[in-house]
Image (cartoon, grey):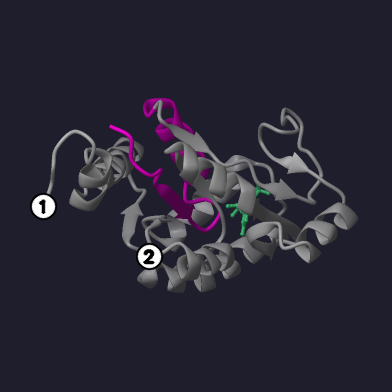
């Protein structure tokens, strides 16, 4: 079945477990690729250029913005991040499903131009648990943690316009829900009919 690729957009406040859920879902679905974003933030230990992100200078990023090379971009925690238009167009043409792990500002930009996209928000069960996870990571200072929690309050308000919300209380349950979303979206009648139009004569 050759249908148009599906664009999955996943957002969450930091500490909700989005990164782990996205990694698992990419491993599970062979036909689903992670879209590699461009960023101006420095590379963290263990990260690879071209795999985790395309790490670029502020100047190179600015040039891409000026050239209209981004489908969306935003400033997050003081750094810039963007999804290249070419990445999405190539995936769409190839019938490749892609998953974008991006913030709410970027997702809102895409919502306008990619109406067929599937927008998923991951929520933590409550603020207490969010704080516990951020502290447990042991990567941020108390001040940064408080800033992330304050930001989370604003981000969570955005959840209302997403197509789906997954509450990540129990990881396995959240993963099962995310899997169900990916599977169900692939079974939407419009997509299946599109994929099988050369096999069956629908509407004839
Ligand atoms: P991190 O620096 O921890 O990898 O990511 C920080 C935030 O930037 C996360 O919320 C992540 O989803 C978001 N992000 C990553 N890539 C993009 C992108 O291409 N566009 C937008 N708008 N946000 C992104």
When the figure is inspected, residue 137 is found, relative to residue 114, above or below; the finding is above
Secondary structure, mark 2, is: loop
Of circles 1 and 2, the one toward us is: 1
Question: Which of these two is toward me, 58 or 134?
Answer: 58
Residue found farthest to the left: 204
The quadrant in which residue 149 appears is bottom right
Residue 4 vs residue 155: left or right? left
Along the viewing direction, whichever of 86 and 125 lies nearer the viewer: 86
Image height check: is 104 above or below 37? below
* x and y percentages locating residue 158 in the rendered image: 45, 71
**Which residue is denoted by mark 2 in the rendering?**
162
Q: Earlier in the sequence, mark 1 or mark 2?
A: 2
Mark 1, Cα crowd under 10 Å, few <14 / some 14-19 / many 20+, is: few
Q: Residues within 10 Å of mark 2 (few under 14, many from 20)?
A: some
Quarter of the image for residue 53 reads top right
Q: CA distance from mark 1 to mark 2?
A: 32 Å
Element under disc 1:
loop
Q: Position of residue 59 (x, y in %)?
A: 90, 56
The residue positioned 39% from the left and 60% from the top of the image is 126
Magenta highlight on residue 18: yes
Q: Is residue 73 above or below residue 49?
A: below
Residue at image mark 1:
203
Which contiguous range is marked in magenta? 1-29
């Amino acid at each position: 079945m050759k249908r148009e690729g599906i664009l999955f957009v996943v957002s969450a406040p930091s500490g909700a477990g989005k990164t782990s859920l996205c990694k698992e879902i990419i491993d599970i679905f062979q036909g689903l690729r992670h879209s590699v974003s461009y960023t101006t933030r420095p590379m963290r230990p263990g990260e690879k250029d071209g795999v985790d992100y395309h790490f670029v200078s502020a100047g190179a990023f600015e040039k891409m913005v000026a050239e209209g090379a981004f489908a969306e971009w935003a400033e997050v925690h003081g750094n810039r991040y963007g999804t290249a238009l070419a990445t999405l167009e190539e995936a769409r043409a190839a019938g490749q499903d892609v998953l974008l792990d991006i913030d709410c500002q970027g997702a809102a930009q895409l919502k306008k131009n990619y109406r067929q996209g599937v927008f998923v928000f991951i929520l933590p069960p409550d603020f207490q648990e969010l704080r516990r996870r951020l502290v447990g990571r042991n990567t941020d200072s108390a001040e940064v943690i408080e800033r992330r929690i304050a930001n989370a309050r604003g981000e969570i308000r955005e959840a209302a316009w997403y197509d789906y919300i997954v509450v990540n209380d129990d990881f396995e349950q959240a993963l099962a829900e995310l899997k169900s979303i990916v599977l169900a979206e692939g079974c939407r009648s419009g997509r299946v009919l599109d994929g099988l139009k050369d096999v069956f004569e629908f509407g004839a």
